[in-house]
Image: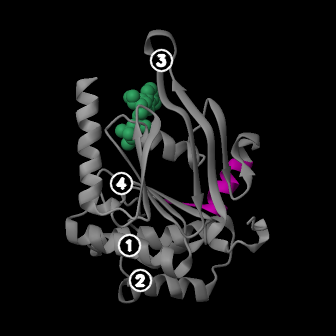
Amino acid sequence: MSTPAAAHGRAEQVVARATRLSKVYGSGDTRVVALDQVSAEFRRGEFTAIMGASGSGKSTFLHCLAGLDSFTDGSVQIDGVELGTLKDRQLTRLRRDRIGFIFQAFNLLPTLTAMENITLPLAIAGHKPDQAWLDRIVATVGLADRLGHRPAELSGGQQQRVACARALASRPAIIFGDEPTGNLDSRAGTEILSFLRDSVRELEQTIVMVTHDPVAASHADRVLFLADGRIVDELAQPTADVVLDRMKRFDARTRTN
Ligand code: ADP
Ligand code: MG
């Protein structure tokens, strides 16, 4: 039985799509195919982890999806917009308005309070913060009593929670994280991952996160595995054990190559 597209809920909505996405660095002897015709879809309210050995193309994939890096071939759509058709200024605006980032380094401004850091991108964009939304984010992140503190007065985990709240503040269509828990101890890392999980469940946020940690990946709804610039496997409802098992298999295969 066919279902009309309109009958699908918002959870079915594709927020980001890569189609035969390729990225080549250099030329001649130094030519590296970092992404080799990668196709993937990311749906609203879905939390995806991207895993793969060092050099498999994870960061390149994330940066191309997020409009931070140009690509060589194929296409990327974010929120229905084809990135390849945009001029630089349009791309900058799309990134600002529709995309959130969480990096390994928290990238907070040291002289601003937590709250000022959270609302700074909105201020720069000239957007009035939606107070009800901010209150909800702050409650979800659990920082209500720390909003007046500067980054130096916060733990690493708290700083990363501020960075998460900053990423959520503009209600982006999608949030990209490159090893967002990479600089945190396991307890703070778990806090951030639970928070990202909550933002997916409660705020219908869409998240794509690069990680090398099977425990971090187990917080996602699915895992995409990259090897040599290609998606070689996908795992739904991952557990840390199954992810680890899958990683070992890829490692074994890489070694015998
Ligand atoms: P990962 O994040 O999985 O470790 P990357 O996306 O950083 O992998 O890199 C994928 C491949 O592209 C690697 O072979 C890497 O050496 C190469 N690469 C990445 N960035 C550049 C660059 N700026 N110039 C040349 N080669 C690059
Ligand atoms: Mg990387």
Point out the quarter of the image occupied by ligand 1.
top left
Q: Earlier in the sequence, mark 1 or mark 2?
A: 2
* Residue 67 as seen in the image, left or right of residue 35: right
* Residue 107 as seen in the image, left or right of residue 85: left
Whether ligand 2 has any atom under 8 Å from the Cβ at mark 4 is answered as yes
Looking at numbered disc 3 in the image, what kind of residue is underneath it?
Arg
Q: Earlier in the sequence, mark 1 or mark 4?
A: 1
Q: Which residue is mark 3?
A: 31
Q: Are marks 1 and 4 in contact (CB under 8 Å)?
A: no
Q: Are marks 1 and 2 in contact (CB under 8 Å)?
A: no
> Element type at marker 3?
loop
Which residue is at a point 59% across and 62% down the rendered structure image? Answer: 43
Looking at numbered disc 1 in the image, what kind of residue is underneath it?
Arg
Which residue is at a point 28% across and 30% down the rendered structure image? Answer: 254
Q: Which residue is mark 1?
A: 161
In the displayed structure, 198 sits above or below 65; it is: below
Identify the image quadrant of the N terminus. Answer: bottom right
